[in-house]
Image (tube, coloured by chain):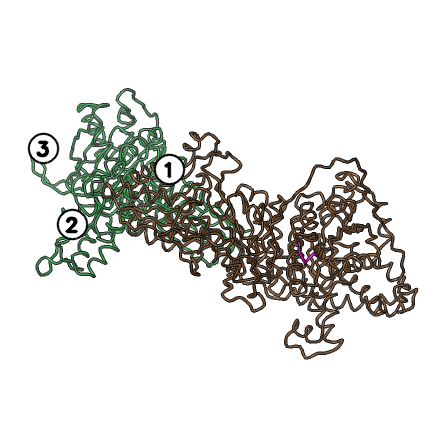
Chain colours: A brown, B green
Amino acid sequence: MSSPIYLSNVRPDFTPFREDLGVLPGYTYSGTLAQELERGRLTPQQALNLFEDMLIIREVEDMIVRLRSGAYDPLPGYNYRGPTHVSIGQEGTAVGACSVLRVTDRITSTHRGHGDSLAKGCSAIRQMSEEQLRARVPGSTKSGTELLEEVLEDHVFRTIAELFGKDDGYCRGRGGGMHIADFRVGHLGANAIVGGGVPIATGAAMALRYLRSSDIVCCFAGDGAYANGVVLESLNFACQAQWTNHLAGDHRYGLPIIFLIQNNLYGMTCRAVEEVFGVRHLGRRGAGFADNNMHAEVVNGMDCLAVRDAVLRAAELCRRGDGPVLLDVVTYRYYGHSLGDPRVEYRAREEEAAWRAQDPIERLKRQILDTGIATPDELAAIEQRVRDRNTRAALRAADAPDPRPEDVLKFLYTTSRCDEVPEPYRNVQVLDREASRVKRDAQGRITYRDAIKEGMVEEMLRDRRVIFYGEDVAEYGNAFKLSKGMLETFGRERVFNTPISEACICGTAVGAAMVGLRPIVELMYMDFALMASDQIANQAGKWQYMSGGQTKMPLVIRASVGGGKGYGGQHSQTLESVFAHIPGLYVVYPSTPYDAKGLIKAAVRDDNPVLFVESQLLYSEKGVVPEEDYLVPIGQADVKRTGTDLTFVGWGPAILDALRAADALAQEGIQAEVVDIRSLVPLDEETILRSVAKTGRCVVVSQAVQIGSFTAEIAARIIEHAFDELDAPVVRVGAKDGIAPQSHVLEAAFLPNVQDMIAAARKVLA
Amino acid sequence: MPHAIAMPKPGQFTEECTILRWRKKEGDPVAKGDILFEIETDKANMEVESFYEGVLLKILVPEGGTVPVQTIVAYVGQPGEPIPEAPSPPQPEGPASQRAAPPASNAATAQATPSATAALEGSVTAPRPVAVPTGTSVPPPPAATAVAAAISTPETPSKWRISPRARRLARDAAIDPSKIPGTGPGGRIVERDVRAYLDAHGYHRLRISPAAKELARREGVDILTVRGTGEGGRILVEDIRRAIAERPQLMSRMRQVIAQRLTHSFTTTPHFFVTLGVDMTDLLRFRQELKDRGAPYTVTDFIVAAVVRSLMEFPEFNSRTDGRYVWRSTKVHLGLAVALEHGLVVPVIRDADDLSLAELHDRAAALVQKARDGKLTPDDMTGGTFTISNMGMMNVDHFTAIINPGEAAILAVASTREVPVVRNGQVVVRSIMNITLSADHRLVDGAAAAKFINAIRSKLEDIARWRSEV
């Protein structure tokens, strides 16, 4: 097989030209229900389903509105505590789009996502086999339409139960309306961070492409989100040339994703077009990211059939490998941002009336009556059925048990791990194994940098689901030559460069993990993690919990710390403490080559999201690392040196300094123990406390600035749990509470060193 | 909303009070006016009534707890009402001196005194009368200081430092670490100090029964202070029990105040004493006559009346001094020392110079009853200008009393005895009562005291005068 290495050879060519940016079609659909029926694109039953599904959404949301004023008659006085971001008016968009998606197609949605969630569920349920239906209501004895009805009611019930925060809700009461998800029908979650779900959807599409799936992703996001950086980065990420050009080899396949803008004219209250955007039609954004304008068009979102038509065509494009597609679906939100929004401050009543006159449900109802596929009485019966079903579901949901308080942390982490790779993923194609093989010296030693690579390579050889991407990781072998040779070994499908978009690097990993991959992504400098902080903290860290354990999050984010090299304030930060403050993430930081290999491998196999922090100061440190497969368990500290007189506890490069300090102290007959926690989260408290119980004196060390550092967390836990063991106050050693300077003199003063540790030791030994 | 029950502020200067006893339990119904709990101030014990109807929902300060006045101590409300998330009440704690190390040597107690003295000096305008007779007649030391003792978890003063590890080692060894010299930073006692101390005191040679050690640990007995009575000096449980029984007990708040104030008075006021026998024969007979006629007067009433009138004649005995100024009082507010089970209180008959014998009788009787019922308010016990301590019922020949801070003198009244005396050259049996005046030599001299005490005597012996009054 040919080498995946590609040397670009672009010559200067300044020949004058005029590029035609093409045409943005809008509102081109002119079909009617009669035509759709006639052309066989819709059956009468499907038309009635569209009508019913829109009604289901409106009924649930109308219930929310009524509950807030005590006017939902079936539940008088019920105290509804959750958010009230209703999408009434937008039902045509949700239902029209979801009606053409397959059961296994994925969606992501927004804080105003009840409609998308209900529509995706209804559409999927209506496509399910009897067996699939029964799996959703175990124990049911029904069949046929009765079974379908039971499952539909269960769908409404689980939705309302989630809104009510009940254990029977889709997310076990952990997510609520703004984070509702049903992974069984491909709903990867509503997202309460505006735009937060868009890179996730992009990553899911990337994974589906990698897995050769014919499924697609429909990414719902509002107009407001299309001013958000991560959304625009996602459009670019999705449109990368490398998915479809010669770099893709024989798998030239665009990301199968429809970016569906639910353009309801308002980003909360800001007026999209008139106020905060510079384009008349958001669909125009497509021209900025792909030469084909992302097949962008503007669609009438008040016409369920128009949306259906557009999404049907978009889905076909995606399944052909011609994605992504951008659809600017213009719709209207009858209510305000939430029920606390009186609307009158920013829009005219006449505007609302004009849009209400275009109501998507009334529109379809008229067409149904016009075509005669149902009589007014039959439609009234559907309306009654929807209302009664909702009443039964709401009553059940109100009576359903609350989650148990003792389970407040359930689903935060999973205990599962990939100990055995499923059969389909064991077959790994290797191009050039030698290119990434690590050489050992005579003592069997390799560097910390190579240890990480060896761990990644071993895991990629073991499991085809493991892919590795980030900035400059391919031909260049990453900024520190850490991944050199991995592209040659695995090819560009599994080792590829990304745009300089840390938010997308991390966010796509979340989506890929949700769809079944086990990505390793790289942040060239840990400082850049802050660019991706939403995706790391709000997405990777939270989805296991917010989905009530519906998904796992097997991804590794590697972040390289640049401190100590004179790179200044934006390339030198030790930020793991920041992420240790985010429950839902694991945070590890090895200090030796042995630990680095064992931990990266354990991180890849873990089903929780792991932030793997590494230090550039350590990259060239050598140590004996076994060639064979081994894991360093996450959450297990290591006593790097035993002693009786005091304990150094810490992590990262500070451990090496602590060991040097211990050597110096040993000259005076002082025996220091050095405990390397290796994992900040989960923290191996037991090993720390055992050591402190032995020595009675403790110095906590790291290279992080002192303020808010995890060293304080360790000190606090020692004081809390081992107070009686202490013979002196716990002392911390870290960087000064400042910014890493460029000057090497200043940086030396800024960072902690061996002398600081010896001084701290003397203080606690006094 | 439940009603918050606050610690009352019984007197103008009361800053904190101790809950002696809860008269209602949580869950008990409470009617308006029911007694909820009893408190001990630095002056008196009082009952606190409820202003509210309902149920005692929650007790926040347990018996023995001392909290600042106005602190919420309980909630009364309707059953099931939620208790507001109030900021947690200050932890009940003992008085300052209680936090000092147990005064095996009195050093810690002595340290605590200056501030208390300062407080006393600062409050001379509101003297707090407490008088204690000296000599053989001191009321028995209070046996029931259980309330105070229960809350006196001995703690170390803040400046005394010990590392947690050393503290635990000392606790495990059942020794008192306060005697250990510390060699850590700032004199902190660290583990090595405890170990050295144990070695130096031959701790490891001690033979201690495990049960005894456990008991010593639990009760905080320093095992190094215990002499073992078992075979070969083995320390047994009974040795620890003995040590517990003999260890210092915290005095009640009332006794502590008595101690502070009288120590101050006795050590800063130059006392001198003048004693005189009063012939009570005629007065006793006259009183019996009155009693037979149904009049209620007691001997004390006559003494009070005699003293009040004498004070009007000798105003220097109705004054006070700081050694530089003299404050004369134009009114007589007469304090009467009343012995109680656990101490002594001095209710004050205000404006006694305006009162007839009958009125004095009524006022004295009412105050004594109130005192015995523990219902004196702080205002009942402040503002005295002179005090009488009457131990006539206690079978004593003679005693001297300590002047109440802020007064010029105090009169100690002993029992009346039938003794042979010479009258007109004849030995006759008369009923003689010794009275002893303690006076502040800064204000008055012996001659004045002699005149004053004789004025009292002559009034008591002048039956004709009493006859005209009743």
Kindly indicate whether the residue at mark 1 contacts the one at mark 3 (C-beta within 8 angstroms).
no
Viewed as shown, does residue B63 lie left or right of B463? right
Q: Chain of mark 2?
A: B
Using the image, tell me which numbered label, if any, was put on residue B225: 2
The residue labelled by disc 1 is: A753
Q: Name the kind of residue labelled 1 in the image.
A: Asn
| Total marks in image | 3
Q: Label for residue B424?
A: 3
**Bounds of the magenta segment:** A248-252
Specify which label sits upstream in the sequence, 3 or 2.
2
**A251 part of magenta stretch:** yes
Q: Is residue B30 left or right of residue A293?
A: left
**Label 3 residue SS:** loop
Task: Place residue A176 in its image quadrant.
Answer: bottom right
Residue A638 rendering spot, x and y as whole percentages: 37, 53
Relative image position of residue A511 (x, y in whole percent):
62, 56
The quarter in which the C terminus of chain B is drawn is top left
